[in-house]
Amino acid sequence: MLEVRDLRVGLRRGDAEVPVLDGVSLSVAAGECVAVVGESGAGKTVLALAVMALLPPGMRVTGGSIRVAGTEVVGAPDAVVRVVRGGTVGMVFQDPQASLHPAFRIGAQVAEAIRAHRPGFGRARAQAEAAARLRRVGLDDPRVYPHQLSGGMRQRVMLAMATANDPVLCIADEATSALDVTVQAQVLDLLAAARTGTGAGLLLVTHDLGVVAATADRVVVCYAGRVVETGPVATVLGAPQHPYTRGLAAAVPRLDLVAPVAPIPGQPPNPWDRPSGCAFRTRCDRADARCTAEVPVLGAVVGAPPDAGAVACHHPGPEVAP
């Protein structure tokens, strides 16, 4: 459903341009959930926006390929992009309050998305379909306005809108981060039901490793605009090879451990002042001269099974060096 190859996105300031995404590759198969994780600034949302051709001013795709169900998005004309955006791909954004129009009823907004991609639907038919889509996510009244709903209910509206045209790919960008645990679980169940019912792929952008463990089939770990580790969820979270992935896992509170949470020291690099070599070396306890001189290349770990995934690190391993 989605094939991203060597994607590069640049951020321009004046006459200068720096990479925000630097050679990112991933794929999502039909019915598969792939999670993209990392700290703020890792490039997760930029990746999702690039797939939708919604990069903000100042950013542009400088290289690589994005294919959605066989259609190339990079460099595609507006007519093709309009079909992909909202038709072939549906997206659930992080803040439904900012994504929904406050002056229109929720049924009208879902109906608008349907009519934009189904020319044969008249107003009445689109409104009936919108009401049915809203009922699927537990909302019985299409006549209410967004401000009359809770945050979780507004996110349900976004989910109904994203799946209204039965897309082959859904993107959820931090769709549960602002919700309480109970509502978060309900939204995740609805995403899973939508994926199961239509066979669509799901690209889940999140910082919550608990959500990843419960939902995803594969995980892609991003740092400073590059993929540093990828593979099956059980492998990556159970025996992380990259120091950054280990740091993310160690920073998650656990009820079965009495040890305090150990945050990763330091901060992610500024794109305008990225260190040479490995971008994570300034925060890594294994960094040496090679890490300063060479950018690590994503590849399979020596001796690991073929399906174990890949890591971009000069000194991979599940254990922290003494």
Image (cartoon, rainbow, N blue to C red):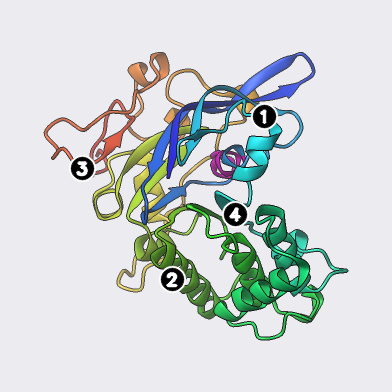
Question: Where does the image place residue 313, in percent across and percent down from the top left?
Answer: 32, 29
First of labels 3, 4 by sequence position: 4
The residue mark sitting in front, 4 or 1, is 1
Q: Which mark is residue 92?
A: none
Kindly tell me whether residue 260 is visible in this rendering. no
Residue occupied by mark 3: 308
Q: Please report the residue visible at 41 percent of the width from the left and 18 percent of the height from the top.
A: 292
Residue 208's place in the image compared with 192, above or below, is: above
Q: Could you say whether the residue bearing mark 3 is in a helix, strand or loop?
A: loop
**What is the three-letter code of the residue carrying label 2?**
Ala
**What is the three-letter code of the residue carrying label 1?**
Pro
Question: Where does the image place residue 180, in percent across and percent down from the top left?
Answer: 57, 75
Quarter of the image holding residue 262? bottom left
Q: What stretch is highlighted in magenta?
A: 41-49
* Magenta stretch prevailing secondary structure: helix
Measure the alpha-carbon separation of dots 2 and 3. 28 Å
Residue 290's place in the image compared with 248, above or below, is: above
**What is the three-letter code of the residue carrying label 4?**
Met
Question: Where does the image place residue 14, in percent across and percent down from the top left?
Answer: 80, 18
First of labels 4, 1 by sequence position: 1
Q: Residue 91 carries which label?
A: 4
Q: Please report the residue visible at 77 percent of the width from the left and 60 percent of the height from the top.
A: 98
